[in-house]
Amino acid sequence: MTDAVTGAAKSVETPEGLASVEAVLSMLAQSGYIATPEIATAVYLAHHLRKPVLIEGPAGVGKTDLARSVALGLDQPLIRMQCYEGLDESKALYEWKYGKQLLYTQILKDKIGHLVEDADSLDEALHKLNSFQDIFFSRDFLEPRPLLKAMEQSTGSVLLIDEIDKSDEEFEALLLEVLSDYQVTVPEIGTIAAQVPPLVMLTSNATRELGDALKRRCLHLHIDFPDAELEARIVRTRVPGVSERLLERLVAFIQAVRGENIRKLPSISETIDWARTLILLHADSLEPAMVRSTLNVILKRQSDIAEVSGKVEALLDSRDKAGR
Amino acid sequence: MERTLTRYIRALRSAGAGVSTTEAMDAARTVEVVGWEDRRVLKTALGTVLAKSVEEKAIHEKLFELYFSREAAAAAASESQPGEGEDPDSGQLGEGEAGAGGEPQSGDTEDGGEGGDEGGDGGDPVEALSALVRGENPGKMAMALERAGAAAGVDEIRFATQSGYYSRKMMEQMGVEALEARLMEALGRRDAQGQADAEALMGDRSALQKQTRAFVEARFEIYGRSAQDAFMNEILAERSFGALGRSDTARMRALVERMAKRLAVRHARRRKVRDRGRLDVRRTLRANAGHDGVPFDIIWKIKRKDRPKIVAVCDVSGSVAQYVRFLLLFLHALKEKVTDLETFAFSAHLADVSRPLETLPFETAMRAIVDEVGSGGTDYGAAFLELDRDFTEVIDRRTTVLILGDGRSNYSNPRLDVFKQIADQAKRLVWLCPEPAPNWGSGDSCLLEYRPFCTLLTQCSTVIDLERALDEILMAYD
C-alpha cells in the first residue's frame, strides 16, 4: 500500500504553498486568512491524501472564505457551486445544449433530407442516419456545470461545494463519484476524468445530518468561533485602520456577548463589520450609547438585541475587570 | 507503528466513535504524511481523518491524550535502556513480543536485552520481582506491566468494578504467588529476621498492587469508560421516571439532550415535497422560454409542509411532576426543531408557563411553576375550560395539543364538551399517561372518557416512551 500511495502522490505536483503545515499557514496568511493549526493541517492533508474536506461550523466563521483564500494562495481558479433544495445533475454536472441541438437540427434538415434521398428503404435511411447520430451528443453540445468544469481545469482548481446540507440527499449520492474518483460519467460520451484532481472543499451549516457515505469520504474540519487573540489578529488583518485600543475592547465585548443566552451568536464576519462601522463613526473607544446604537450590526434578532442592550454596561465592565 | 495505530483505532471504536476501515487506512496514510515526530500535528491530523463530528472530535481529544501519553511514557522508558534506537514506538514492541509478535528485528533486540537482565538479577524470580517493584529500573517495570497486562487481557475491561479482578490477574502473571508463598514462610518463622523479611515482602506486594491497579485504571479510562457509560444509559432509558433517584438526574439530562438531538436530526428533512403529477404551468413556461416554448424542463407543483407547532398542557401535581420535568426537558432540547412551542401547566388552575421556562434556568423555572399553579387537587375539567376560554387563539389547525397527565381529576366534572372542542380545533391531540393501561379508568381516572377524542393515547413512563411519542408527533409534520 505504501508504494501505491507515494507513487500517486508523486504524480501530483505539490505546490510550494502546500509543502508543509507551516507553508499552508503562511500561504493563507498572505491571502489574508488567519488560520488555526487545525485548518492548516486539514488543507495540507486534503492535498496529500487527495481527499475532499468537509468544513462544518456556525455561519460566518470563514468556511467559504477558506476556500477562496486557498484558491488565491495557490493561484488556481475557484469554482464555486452553491447548493440548494432541488439542485440536480443538470445544474451541477453538465447539461446538453438543447437550444443549440434544436437549431442545428433545423439548419441541417435539408442536408439530412439530401443524405437519405437516395436510400431505397426505410432501413437503409435509418442505417445512414445512424452513422451520424453522435454529432448531437458530442462535447460540442455539452454545457459543463461546476463539477465538470472543475474536472476540466488543466492547472488544477479549488472546487467549493457550498452549503451541501441545503441540497437533497439524492444529490449527495451524485457527488460520491466526483469526490472519490475525481471523474464524471456522461452516459453518451463516457467517463471524463480530472486532468489534475481539484482540491475539493464542502461546507455545511449542519441544518441536516449528512450521509455517512459522504462523511466517510471526506476529511472533517470543524471551525468554531475563534478565541480572543485569534479574533483580534483576524480583525487586524481585515480592517487595517482599527486602533489597538478599540480592537482589544471590541473583541472582548464580542467574546462576552457570545457567552450570553442569545439565539444567533455574532460570528467573525459580524465582528469585522462592526469594526468597520465603528471606524466610520470615528469611535476610538466603546461607549455604552455607541454600542447600543450599533448593536444591530452584530445581532440579527430583535429579541437578542433587547437581551444584550440591557446588559451593555455589565458586559463592558466585566471585561474591564477581567482585563486587570 | 501500525500496531500502535490499530490499537488506537480500536480504543476509539470502543469509545463510540465509528471508524470505518477506509478511515483506518486513511489514518495510516496520514501518519506516513505527517510522521510521528510532532505530537500536536499528529493529533490534529488524526482528528481530521478519524473524527467526523463534533462529538467524535471530543472523544478523540480525550482519548489521544490518554492513549499517547501512555505510549510516550513506555517509549521514553525503553529509550533509557541501552541498545534501543530512538524509535518512539519501541515501547510498543515489548508488548508485541508478549502478544502477536512485533517486527522481527526489533523484537530480537528486546528478547536479547530481557534475557541479559534476568541473568543479572541472579535468577531468583521473587528477588527479581522485588527489585522491579522497588523501581530500580522504571523502564523495565513499565514493560513488565505492559506484558502482564496483555497476558491478562486488561484491554477487555468494561466496568470499573472489574479493576480488582484484572489487577490480581496481572499480579499473578508477574509471579506474585511465589512472593506470597515466601511471605507466608517468613511470617511463620517467628524470629526477628523473619519479621523483617516479611515486612519487606509485604511492602513490595502492596507496591506491586498499587502499580498494577493504576495500570488497570488507566486502561479502563481508555477502553472501558465509554462502554460502561453506554450500558448505564441503556438501563436508565428503560427505567420509569418515577423510579429515578436524585443521582440519576444529571445523567438523565445528558441522555435526554442526546436523544432530542437525534430526533431533531431525524426530522430535519426538507419542508417541501414535490407533488408529482401536477404540472406547474406558469413556471414551466417561464423556464422554457429560451427553448422557444418547447417544454424540455418540466416543473412540478410543490407542496409545502407545516412547521411543527406544539401546545403542551402538563399536569404538575405531585403524582406526575417528575414525568413533566422530563417531557419539558425533552421539548426544550428540541427547540431547534419545534420553534413554535407553548407550554401550559395546571394543577388546581392553569397558567401559561412558556415565559419562565425560556428565561429562567430549568430547575428554578420548575419550582416557580409549581408555586404559581398551586398544589391543590387536580381538576382536569377546569384546566381545559380555562385553556379554551383564555388561550383559544394558540390552538389552530396546525397545532398538536400534547397533554401529559394521569387523568385523575378528583371526581370533578371532566367537561368532555370543552375537551371535544379543543380536539376539533387542533390538528391532533396526543395524551401521554404515566400510568400503565390497565389502571386507566380505575378510581378517579377519567382517561377512558377522554380517550375517544384523542388522536393518540399512550403510556409514557420512560425516556424511550417519550422519544417514541415525540417521534410520532413530529412525523405528522414530515
Image (cartoon, rainbow, N blue to C red):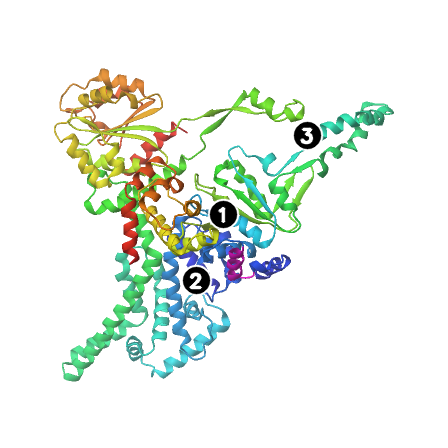
Decide which of B208, A21 is in the foreground and name it: A21
B305 lies left or right of B245: right
Inter-mark Cα distance, 3 to 1: 34 Å
Q: Which residue is mark 3?
A: A98
Q: Which residues are magenta?
A: A19-30
B401 lies left or right of A190: left
Residue farthest along the top direction in this orientation? B417
Q: Is residue A44 visible?
A: no
Give the mark nearer the N terminus: 3 vs 1. Answer: 1
Decide which of B125, A296 is in the foreground and name it: A296
Q: Which residue is mark 2?
A: B40
Tell me the subunit letter for badge 3. A
Residue at the image point whose x is 30% and y is 24% from the top = B394
> Where is residue B313 drawn, in percent x and y?
25, 28
Inter-mark Cα distance, 2 to 1: 21 Å
Amino acid marked by disc 3: Tyr
